[in-house]
Amino acid sequence: MRFLVAVLLAVAVAVLPAQAAALQTPVTTGVVDLTGSESGLDGAAVVFEGEVVSELLAGGPGHGWLNVLDGGMALGVWLPNEMAREVRAFGDWKSSGDVVRVTGTFNQVCAEHGGDMDVHATALVVLDRGEERTRPVSYWKLAIVGAGALVALFGYRRLRRAEQEGLDA
Amino acid sequence: MWVGLKKRDVRIIAHYVGLLVVAVGLAMTVPLATALFSAEWDPALDYLAGISVAGGAGLVLASAAPRESVLSRQNALIVTALAWVAASIVGAVPLYLSGQYGSYLDALFDAVSGFTTSGLTLVRDLDHLAHAHNMWRHLTHLIGGQGIVVAALTLAFGMRGGGAVSLYLAEGRDERILPNVVHTARFIWFVTAVYVALGTIALTVHNLLLGMEAGRSFLHAFWATIACYDTGGFGPQSQNALYYHSPWFEAITVMLMIGGTLNFNLHADIWRGDRRELFKNIEARTLAVHFALLSAAVGLGLGATQYFSGEWAVIRKGVYHIFSAHSGTGHQSLYPSQWTRDYGDLALVAVILAMALGGMASSTAGGIKAIRTALIGKGIVQRVKMAIAPQSAVVAAKYHHLTEVRMRPDTLSLALLIFALYVITYVTGAMAGLMYGYPAREALFESISATANVGLSAGITAPSMPTGLKWVYMIQMWIGRLEFIAVLGLVASVVASVRGRKRRGRP
């Protein structure tokens, strides 16, 4: 019986490569590795973590795009809308976005999406909720404002004098 | 004879450079308003500081001579060359104060890249940059694309004296659409306003449909419109055009890129209802041939690759980048590493050629320009005809460029001269990249992208790149934007002045 199951599994894996990829243990990686030099992971199941830096963008019937930032590089994640609804915040100057763990298939050049490099997500877990960032005001910059204004006043008075005296003065 | 600068010349030059710097300071009120509107208080201080520094430096320089001092043609060249440097120096101040640049040099690099409509960037963590700073980065494209002098002329900003015409011509513009240069400058802005309004509306609707919130939809639309129409290439997100994952975004932006790469004289003719000029004009025809041949080459090249063989991928990753490169925009929907890894040699060469050849003259595009390649082509045909014609025959070359024109030898030699200067600069920049240890394809790609003010990147341009190479690319962007003559005029004048002073100092 075990032998029969093993044979059937082997046949299924050989005949259905897409399903085979899904059965693979996802490779833990990062966006920099995926988008940088040859990762060798085209078509492979991957898992990576990063901060969401876009609202859910339309991606065809029932699907959407989230852009996920990791190590200074962002990567598009195509996923079902239900899965994306887990995400509440995206990062910008005022707030950090939700940190998510994405599992899915990495496409170096996605034939379905006009050649975009992307990940088709099969699972998404929110690891950390985004929150508002504190952006303190650097009041020392007022010193530059003041100094510049004084120089401008000096320049304006010199310009007025130059007007009266002419170029040959 | 080399003529050096006298003290009087230096004072007049300082005066006009100062006025242009004050104008750049006034332009910073737009990002200041953006910061206040978006409740970005620290960036608001960055722009108050920027305005203050520009106002201070500009007025001190302007006070070197009274207003309405007469500006000679030679001095206008120097003012133009220096104005772009001075604008970048003050324009970098608020960017540096943002804290998102590794050094002032990196902020200066972005200011130079912005004003020259290049689009290469050294900003860190772009995805978390404030609206105000994004507004300023994109506004530098708008100011630079129209021409800093044109921008100032539009406001008739302190240009009531004899300087207006000289400065206008010195900025490399030859449009005299209307008899008065101030009116011509205003017409250029009018055309721009029409494109910016249409592009912003179209992309705002697109972004809303994509699911973006209203405020971001508008801001992203406005910035993308400016970046494409002014053939700049900055984007508010690190993924640039790829952020939207949308063929519609790419289609709308391609239309804006084409608008930006058209000669303003051609815009004027179309505006007046003469659409036939678009089909007769030698520059428009040449550009159309370039687009067709290079699109075919990129299609063939990508078709032969392992990855981009699908039709949709050829259009969105191939033809899109030919338009982006040829117009000098530099909007990119690929990761830098993909150019040399996945793109294939033929397709890569097509994109490199598109960048090198550039758009039309008197537009916001960079590069060699279609009119020059057309003239050189005509010159070659004329030479061949002369070689096989009877000795007594007179072989004349004619072409249609706004009017029927008979090609003069000096026109051809100037086209060849500028062509040669571009090629020399492309190669020199590539050699610099090679000396810093970068591979040849990347080094050539980045050098041409900088000189032709395109902004596509194969990955060399990054905050961690060598300082020397940052300077090389900044100089390339500057001289490429001004098409060499103004910068060479500045260098020659300074050298002649120094030599003259030494000579006078001898017993």
Image: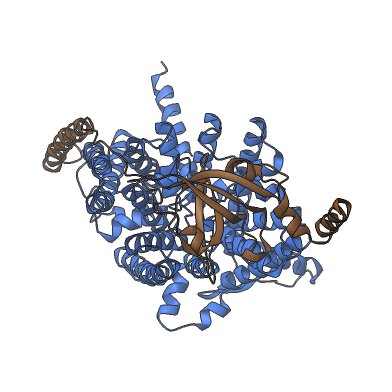
Chain colours: A brown, B blue
Q: Considering only vertical position in the picture, is B315 above or below A119?
A: below
Q: Which part of the image, by quadrant, shows the N terminus of chain A?
A: bottom right
Residue located 53% across and 32% down the image: B464
Vertical comparison of A15 with B492: above or below: below
Outermost top residue: B507
Query: For residue A76, what is the image quadrant?
Result: bottom right
Tell me what residue is drawn at x 45 percent, y 50 percent.
A53
Say whether residue B481 is left or right of residue B422: left
State which quadrant residue B204 falls in.
bottom left
Residue A38, image x, y percentages: 71, 43
Spot the residue most to the front: A1
Depth check, front residue: B24 or B422: B24
**In the foreground, A33 or B82:** A33
Name the quarter where the C terminus of chain A is drawn.
top left
Residue B140 seen anywhere in this rendered image of the structure:
yes
Q: Nearer the viewer, residue B463 or B168?
A: B463
* Count of numbered badges drawn on the protein: 0
B44 left or right of B321? left
Residue B123 rendering spot, x and y as whole percentages: 45, 41
| Res B305 visible | no
Residue B112 coordinates in the image, percent (x, y): 43, 43
Compared across the picture, whether B382 is left or right of B140 comes to right
| Place of residue B253 in the rendered image (x, y in percent of width and height, measured from the top left) | 49, 66
| Left-right relation of B227 to A1 | left
